[in-house]
Image (cartoon, rainbow, N blue to C red):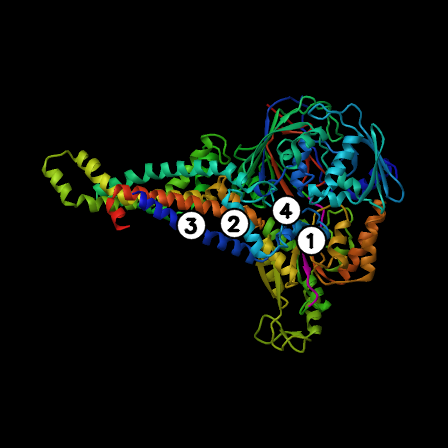
């Protein structure tokens, strides 16, 4: 598959995201160089290690992208564009990927960027000593790396590996010389790449400071200008208190507030002096997966009743003034492979929910608001219809739905637990509705959550649902190279999941960003959790 | 005096041993597998094959006793292990943040003394007057205010509305003012109340009456004879407050987004970073015990009756 074909396919896939925007001033102005851009981030997004080869978080890769351009970038329009690789292609079976690299690029330490450097980076990620917690899995089981010439490198697999570009867009390409010199532990404090900024300072739990690298050649299609970055410095401040995080831009303590909480909506709504962005994150949305191993959710009619009785948009209005994004299925509505049939399948219908529950033996008892069991298999008569809602955050969504479920006689017990407790419950399969969120524009996340082969310790298939057809479809996601075909398979899989009512979609959390008016050309990526500072400048 | 100090030092050994056992036991008794937790934190999910590999790598497959002995043995030589999450030395992680915590605790203590001492003195000297009522109202307000709320009010007023001071960070003296004031004001309430009651008691002593009868100026009576003697119990309180600030400034550190050991330990608990939690708690326990030891020694030096009783 040629690069252009793939780019078009991906472009079509992500067009529905529609969130990538580069904010330009209304009147034409001449960009200026210099100044410090201060961005506030939530403290919980501060990386533990700044080496994206090791650390498994989106924020790490984002911060890495200031220092090191990757081979390809996922641009705001959802297409893959050149960065350190000028072109790429895969064989039709998806087992071999060839990258033609950009000539004349040097790392920040003056050493040359070439095919050997790419090989070194891939091997470093895959080396057991690196203990890469995510990228090694995403780059996959590379069987052999061929150096075709100084500027051409080929990755060979024994099995199809069709999601490589999604991994490569996040993979920082480090200077092999510097990585060797500092070693695995110290390199994260001494990052050397071929990106627009260098890491000048990292005071943990406080700030990171990046300074412009004058040698940068603008090797990234996401940039709107060539040459070094316009900003002289970028300071990232990690804020531990949400109220401070949300107010920082309004109070002129920062130029950009990234990943703000819903309370920020109230602060910036109706303030024309600020630009406020709400950007979708493709993934599963804030879903609750159902444990179908035990009553009451072992009965599909109860599960369907839960779906018919909910009104997520009412909760959205009530809690977030409608700022959250609809999520109606196993992939949220902004996901390029979202199955639209999910929206129509379970529209709010209280009568239908009541009828379904009546059929199951969960009966309305006079004088009682909550239904009780009458002849439900495995449940003593008189047991109230209680469903436990376990989450690690966004407790308020459960609380909003609590009232909705009471209308049909279901008592929703909402609990928020810390991560370790959630894992313990999952390991013991002791839950009814459990929060599970994955974020990725690739449909492969469906495989992780719904393929029954991952129903084992460390796996993400928690529900106990096993369906041969579904597993077969999900297995194909690892080998289908065509983005269109992958989406088609993902849509069929979503239909099976929804027909069996094994998950409860709620809403999708957007990334909220506030910008001061003087911040120009701050370019958001195709996903809400990514942005580019290559061309950003500050108005005087 | 030397014997007294040696005795107090010996008492630290079983205390530290117990602390290490409790911390180790509690962390391992809590539900949740740290290796799985690490994988869960990954974006997009990591495959289950990694779980066993990670458990082995983290030493979690060893018997508990082996894990404890490894931890305790290394701790004795100052090696608190390697953080699971940060993949670096726990000792280094603590030491690079302890400077910030110490800076905050010291400046908070100075603020607490600067506010609490005069407030308590004025209240004692003008006992039962409106000045006393006002001073004690301020003291009660300080002692009873939730620190996170007071911190946010300070940020709202001095950072967001007036724009005088930065709302967050640890970037120079300016960024230290608000957290120190917040931490200090809350503790000042305790100090002022103790100073007041102690001063009232001392001012009723015979030697104060004698001093006045001798014709000493009121200022001399208050500062030389009154305050000096009233400060003996206050020194103990200040020591305890300082120890508490070192070990428990986490709320202030969080509200003002300052680096510090408190925030480090909370993050470690949430991510079940066993070595880091164990190392931090052990380190903070040692710090707390050392501060208390210093207070005891100071107290014994100020009041010889303590030494003889011991």
Secondary structure state at the residue bearing disc 2: helix
Q: Quadrant of the N terminus of chain B?
A: top left
Would you name the residue on which mark 2 appears?
B72
Of callouts 1 and 3, the N-terminal one: 3
Residues at circles 2 and 4 in contact by the CB criterion of under 8 Å: no
Asked whether residue B219 is in view, the answer is yes
Which one is in front, A9 or B242?
Answer: B242
Q: Magenta stretch: dominant SS?
A: loop
Chain where mark 4 sits: A
Secondary structure state at the residue bearing disc 1: helix
Which one is in front, B10 or A441?
Answer: B10
Residues at circles 4 and 1 in contact by the CB criterion of under 8 Å: no
Label 4 environment density (alpha carbons within 10 Å; few <14, some 14–19, many ≥20) = some
The residue range painted magenta reads A280-293
Hey, which quadrant is residue A346 in on the image?
Answer: bottom right
Label 1 environment density (alpha carbons within 10 Å; few <14, some 14–19, many ≥20) = some
Asked whether residue A169 is in view, the answer is no
**Residue B13, numbered label:** 3
Chain where mark 3 sits: B
Magenta highlight on residue A289: yes
**Residue A323, numbered label:** 4
Secondary structure state at the residue bearing disc 3: helix
Please give the name of the residue rendered at 63% of the width and 31% of the height, measured from the top-left corner: A190
Task: Give me the C-alpha separation between circle 2 and circle 3.
Answer: 13 Å
């Amino acid at each position: 598959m040629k690069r252009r074909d793939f780019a078009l396919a991906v472009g079509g896939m992500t067009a529905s995201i529609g969130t990538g925007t580069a904010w330009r001033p209304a009147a034409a102005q001449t960009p200026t160089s210099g100044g410090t851009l201060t961005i506030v981030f939530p403290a919980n997004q501060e990386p533990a290690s700044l080496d994206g080869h090791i650390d498994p978080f989106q924020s790490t890769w984002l911060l890495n992208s200031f220092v090191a351009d990757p081979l390809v970038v996922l641009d705001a329009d959802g297409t893959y564009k050149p960065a350190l690789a000028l072109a790429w292609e895969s064989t039709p079976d998806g087992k071999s990927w060839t990258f033609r690299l950009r000539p004349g690029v040097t790392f920040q330490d003056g050493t040359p960027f070439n095919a050997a450097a790419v090989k070194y980076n891939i091997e470093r990620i895959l080396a057991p000593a690196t203990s890469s917690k995510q990228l090694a899995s995403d780059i996959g089981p590379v069987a052999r790396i061929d150096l075709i010439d100084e500027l051409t490198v080929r990755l060979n697999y024994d099995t199809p590996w069709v999601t490589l570009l999604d991994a490569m867009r996040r993979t920082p390409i480090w200077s092999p010389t510097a990585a060797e010199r500092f070693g695995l532990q110290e390199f994260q404090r001494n990052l050397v790449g071929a990106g627009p900024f260098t890491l000048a300072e990292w005071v943990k739990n406080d700030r990171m400071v990046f300074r412009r690298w004058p040698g940068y050649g603008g090797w990234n299609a996401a940039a709107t200008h060539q040459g070094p970055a316009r900003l002289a410095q970028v300071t990232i401040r990690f804020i531990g208190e949400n109220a401070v995080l949300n107010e920082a831009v309004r109070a002129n303590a920062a130029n950009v507030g990234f990943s703000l909480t819903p309370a920020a909506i109230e602060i910036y709504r109706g303030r024309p002096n600020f630009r406020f962005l709400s950007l979708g994150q493709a993934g599963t949305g804030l879903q609750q997966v159902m444990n179908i191993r035990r009553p009451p959710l072992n009965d599909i009619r109860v599960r369907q009743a839960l779906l018919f009785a909910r009104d997520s948009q009412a909760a959205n209005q009530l809690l977030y003034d409608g700022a959250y994004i609809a999520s109606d299925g196993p992939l949220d509505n902004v996901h390029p492979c979202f199955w639209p049939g999910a929206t129509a399948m379970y529209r709010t219908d209280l009568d239908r929910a009541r009828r379904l529950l009546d059929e199951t033996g969960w009966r309305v008892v006079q004088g009682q608001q909550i239904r009780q069991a009458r002849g439900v298999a495995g449940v003593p008569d008189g047991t109230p219809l209680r469903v436990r809602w376990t989450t690690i955050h966004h407790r308020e969504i459960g609380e909003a739905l609590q009232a909705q479920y009471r209308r049909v006689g279901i008592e929703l017990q909402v609990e928020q637990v810390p991560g370790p407790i959630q894992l313990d419950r999952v390991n013991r399969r002791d839950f009814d509705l459990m929060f599970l969120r994955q974020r990725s524009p690739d449909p492969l996340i469906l495989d992780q959550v719904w393929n029954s082969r991952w129903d084992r310790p460390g796996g993400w298939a928690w529900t106990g649902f096993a369906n041969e057809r579904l597993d077969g479809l999900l297995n194909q996601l690892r080998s289908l190279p065509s983005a269109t075909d992958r989406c088609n398979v993902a849509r069929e899989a979503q239909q099976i999941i929804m027909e069996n009512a094994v998950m409860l979609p709620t809403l999708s959390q957007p990334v909220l960003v506030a910008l001061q008016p003087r911040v120009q050309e701050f370019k958001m990526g195709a996903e809400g959790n990514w942005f580019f500072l290559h061309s950003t400048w500050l108005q005087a | 005096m030397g014997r007294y100090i040696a005795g107090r030092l010996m008492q630290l050994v079983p205390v530290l041993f117990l602390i290490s056992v409790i911390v180790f036991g509690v962390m391992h008794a809590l539900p949740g597998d740290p290796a799985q937790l690490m994988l869960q934190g990954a974006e997009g999910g990591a495959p289950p094959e990694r779980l066993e590999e990670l458990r082995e790598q983290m030493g979690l497959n060893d018997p508990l006793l082996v894990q404890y002995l490894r931890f305790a043995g290394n701790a004795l030589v100052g090696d608190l292990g390697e953080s699971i999450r940060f993949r670096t030395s726990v000792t280094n992680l603590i030491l690079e943040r302890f400077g910030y915590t110490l800076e905050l605790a010291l400046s908070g203590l100075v603020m607490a003394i600067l506010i609490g001492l005069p407030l308590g003195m004025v209240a004692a000297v003008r006992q039962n007057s409106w000045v006393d009522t006002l001073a004690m109202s301020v003291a009660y307000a300080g002692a009873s205010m939730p620190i996170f709320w007071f911190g946010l009010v300070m940020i709202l007023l001095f950072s967001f509305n007036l724009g005088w001071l930065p709302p967050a960070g640890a970037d120079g003296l300016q960024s230290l003012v608000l957290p120190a004031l917040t931490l200090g004001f809350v503790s000042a309430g305790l100090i002022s109340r103790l100073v007041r009651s102690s001063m009232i008691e001392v001012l009723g002593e015979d030697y104060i009456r004698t001093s006045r009868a001798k014709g000493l100026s009121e200022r001399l009576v208050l500062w030389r004879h009154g305050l000096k003697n009233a400060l003996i119990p206050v020194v103990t309180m200040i020591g305890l407050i300082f120890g508490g600030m070192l070990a428990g400034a986490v709320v202030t550190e969080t509200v003002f987004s300052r680096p510090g050991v408190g925030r480090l330990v909370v993050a470690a608990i949430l991510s079940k970073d066993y070595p880091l939690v164990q190392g931090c708690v052990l380190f903070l326990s040692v710090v707390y015990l050392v501060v208390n030891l210093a207070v005891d020694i100071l107290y014994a030096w100020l009041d010889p009756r303590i030494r003889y009783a011991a």
